[in-house]
Image (spheres, helix red, strand yellow):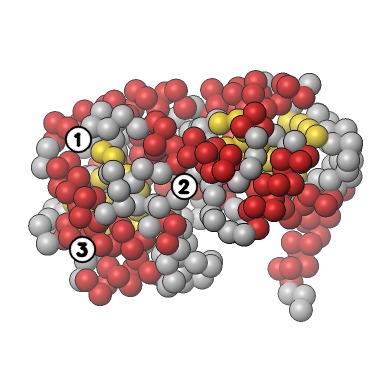
Amino acid sequence: MFTLKKIINKFQFYFQSFLNFFRLGKIFLISDKNNWVIKTIVKEINKNTSIKTSISSSPLFLKNKIIHFGSIHDFIFHKEKVHPSNKIIASWYHINGRNIEKGLAKEIREKNIPIHTSCSITKKGLINLGIKEKQIKVIPLGIDLKIFKPLKNPLEKTEIKKRLGLPLDKIIIGSFQKDGNGWKEGNEPKLIKGPDIFCDTIEILAKKYPLHILLTGPARGYVKNRLSEAGIPFTHKYLKKYNNIVNFYHALDLYIISSRVEGGPMALLESWATSIPLISTPVGMVKDLARPEENILLSSSFSPEEFASLASYLINNSELSSKISKNALKDIQNYSWQKMAESYFQKLYLPFQ
């Protein structure tokens, strides 16, 4: 059944494909407009590379180009539309353990398609699936340091909390990710994102500290239901513009990454850039970039008890919290999109020139 939205999306898809006839440049970045994380990454690469690139939602009508699929899902969806004269690159951020991945890895290995990933954990997983190590390039995600930056005056935090309707007498802990299945309420947890670990941790901490949880993102139903059942106060805002999230970081006392699997996450870089102390599970880029007790508190497992212990340690140690925030702010300067985009050019695109 064709809805108006589907008709509009179909029109936009073919219109974008038609525009490919007239776009200049050798390199095309393919991104699904509905995935805001991939869309943001692709926009930043396009904006910051030193060579001409173009963004499209489709590879139709492209010939003799370098086509970089922003995610492995984009590659799966569009691969049959790619003309054989093109050279393909695909980004693959994390392994989900699905059966389709083995067949996909075999195809990528046999066609010798270069794969970009953001962390060594995923690289190891791709090698285990059978992709050759020389096919894989690890380049971390980047951050726009002109947008994500710390408060100049610590007193501004109080004003931001007031504007967001947050209590001034409680510890504000943040979680800004999609961690429910689907795009509606998200009452069923997406376990690779660890919403159960997050809620278990918060329930332990709430017995010792006055907490208020700040949530953003779609499909947060599971977390909201758990917090409500436990009587833990929270605020949830759905942000229409990604950049608006900066003020939400500025309102925090602590950010928690509780995922079991990640390619990033972006929250690592965003917390560091806004100078918010962070605790995390050993996932994705965190494992590569972490300096435990220097720029982060890193759990050795996925245990809520260990997580709560680390959070307590940070809450009770203002000097450590300050040190972690300052060190993270120094480290994040190495991961600006300007620097990361140059790595994309040198490691992914230049070999094809």
Residue at (31%, 52%) from the top-left corner? 302
In this rendering, the answer to whether 239 lies above or below 291 is below
Whichever of labels 3 and 2 marks the residue nearer the N terminus, that label is 3
Residue at (12%, 37%) from the top-left corner? 317
In this rendering, the answer to whether 142 lies above or below 79 is above
Q: Would you name the residue on which mark 1 appears? A: 321
Numbered mark located on residue 110 in the image: none
Q: Where's residue 98, x and y in %?
A: 58, 59
In this view, the residue farthest toward the bottom is: 1
Res 159 → quadrant: top left
Residue at (76%, 64%) from the top-left corner? 8
In this view, the mark in front (3 or 1): 3
Q: Would you name the residue on which mark 2 appears? A: 262
Question: Which quarter of the image is occupied by the C terminus?
Answer: top right
Query: Could you tell me if the residues under marks 2 and 1 are in contact, i.e. CB atoms within 8 Å?
Result: no
Q: How many marks?
A: 3
Does residue 313 appear anywhere in the picture? yes
Q: Amino acid at mark 1?
A: Ser
Q: Amino acid at mark 3?
A: Glu
- What is the C-alpha distance between the residues marked 2 and 1? 24 Å
- What is the C-alpha distance between the residues marked 3 and 2? 24 Å
The reply, left or right, for residue 322 in relation to residue 123 is left
Res 20 → quadrant: top right
Numbered mark located on residue 203 in the image: 3
Whichever of labels 2 and 1 marks the residue nearer the N terminus, that label is 2
Q: Nearer the viewer, residue 159 or 276?
A: 276
Q: Where's residue 313, x and y in %?
A: 14, 42
Q: Where's residue 115, x and y in %?
A: 65, 37
Q: Nearer the viewer, residue 7 or 223?
A: 223
Which secondary structure, mark 3?
Answer: helix
Q: Amino acid at mark 2?
A: Glu
